[in-house]
Amino acid sequence: MIRKILIACAFMIAIPAAAQQQTPPASGYGAPIGVSEALALIERGMEKSTAQGLKMVFAVVEPSGELVAFARMDDAPYASIRLAQQKASTSARLRLTTAELEERVKGGRMALLSSDEVIAIGGGVPIVVNGRIVGALGVSGGTAAQDAAVAGETVAPH
């Protein structure tokens, strides 16, 4: 029983720390991401998801939330098409990861759910270049944690 409590406490401490680490050091918006850069991100994301045995959907948007590039891996869930786009749009417009928003909702910030422009499910990550948000990547097809991990790894400098 004590072990379960310790594991739960460690989990509760780790989640906010992970969410805080994902906050981009952005001071505003930059010029929108180009299609070639967006397609390269999607390709990198597909490689990462394939390595994990996941079939996913990827959407890259510009800072306004409008779609720049999109791909659905063979046999990825159809429901993930819209989810990936919503995650990317939410992340770009709010300058936050959707995993951070998910944690805020879990912490009681239910007002975030009152807008149809916001989705609070992990998998959306801002794309930051020179301290400015140039777009966002949305990933869907796994669990929220899997989506957030693939999105974060894909956008992280390599």
Image (spheres, grey):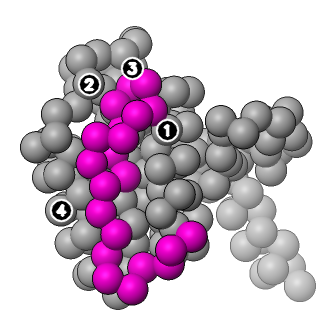
Q: Residue at x 16, y 33 (%)?
A: 34
Q: Earlier in the sequence, mark 2 or mark 4?
A: 2
Label 3 amino acid? Ala
Q: Earlier in the sequence, mark 3 or mark 4?
A: 3
Q: Earlier in the sequence, mark 1 or mark 3?
A: 3
Query: What is the total number of numbered labels drawn onto the structure image?
Result: 4
Residue that sits furthest to the left in the current view: 36
Q: Earlier in the sequence, mark 2 or mark 3?
A: 3
Rendered-image quadrant of the N terminus: bottom right
130 lies left or right of 117: left
Q: Which residue is mark 4?
A: 43
Image: magenta residue range: 59-79
Residue 81 seen anywhere in this rendered image of the structure: yes
Label 2 amino acid? Pro
Q: Residue at x 32, y 82 (%)?
A: 74
What is the CA distance from the residue labelled 2 to the residue labelled 1?
A: 13 Å
Comparing 48 with 72, the one in front is: 72
Could you tell me residue 114's position as x and y percent? 83, 36
Q: Residue at x 43, y 59 (%)?
A: 139
Labels 4 & 1 near each other (Cβ < 8 A): no
What is the CA distance from the residue labelled 2 to the residue labelled 3?
A: 14 Å
Q: Which residue is mark 3?
A: 26
85 lies left or right of 16: left
Q: Residue at x 28, y 16 (%)?
A: 30
Disc 3 crowd, CA 10 A, few/some/many (<14, 14-19, 20+): some
